[in-house]
Amino acid sequence: MTKLAQLRRDAAQYLDTALSVHYDIERPKDDPSLLAVYAFHSRDARYVLVKRAELWAAEHHEYLYLYSMERLTREAAELCWKRMLEDGRPRVRPHAQHMYTYLTAVILYEQAEPEALEAIRRLKQRREFKLSLHGWMESRIAAVDITTAALTTNRAGKALKKDFGRLAASAITKCKERREQT
């Protein structure tokens, strides 16, 4: 195993540990590049005196698909996107209290073709349910270069740059420091 492959594996384990605090984890066996699917569910509500007298409620969901690969090609990026959508769309359950569901793909890679990064920037899918009265679904994708911690996202994924970018950079930095110490 090369040093970069070890760094990618260690960074994925660091991210797994950090995400497992807030997310439920599934580990699919059918795709070696898909490390895990993380699910987050939240429900906010306001009541008057008793819970039966509910004023409003809003549900929020996110499904994050963590991929890891040595070389990111355009075909691989599109395959990750397609797999995320095929698995994620049936998980979206719109109803009157549903606010949003995010489907997010994160790809850790060692090297990438420029066409792959350009393809990632152009990917998009958003769906509104009953004129947004039953919420919406937004699909995001981010590719993380483990050598530089650079984050490439689609337009919807720009919100990931701040928090997830910081988490990924921290994971990569700590894993590099740990490697240098040994």
Image: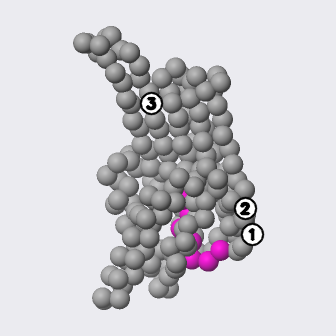
Circle 1/circle 2 CB separation < 8 Å: yes
Describe the element under mark 3 as helix, strand or loop: strand
User: Is residue 131 part of the magenta span, yes or no?
Assistant: no
150 on left or right of 20:
right
* Camera sees residue 34: no
How many other residues sit within 10 Å of disc 3, few (<14), some (14-19) or many (≥20)?
A: some
The residue depicted at 61 percent of the width and 49 percent of the height is 156
**Which residue, as the protein is rendered here, is positioned at the far right?**
115
* Camera sees residue 147: yes
Which label number is shown at residue 59?
3
Quadrant of residue 118 in the image?
Answer: bottom right
Image height check: is 173 above or below 48?
below
Image height check: is 165 above or below 63?
below
44 on left or right of 93:
left
Residue annotated with mark 2? 119
Chain part drawn in magenta: 106-112
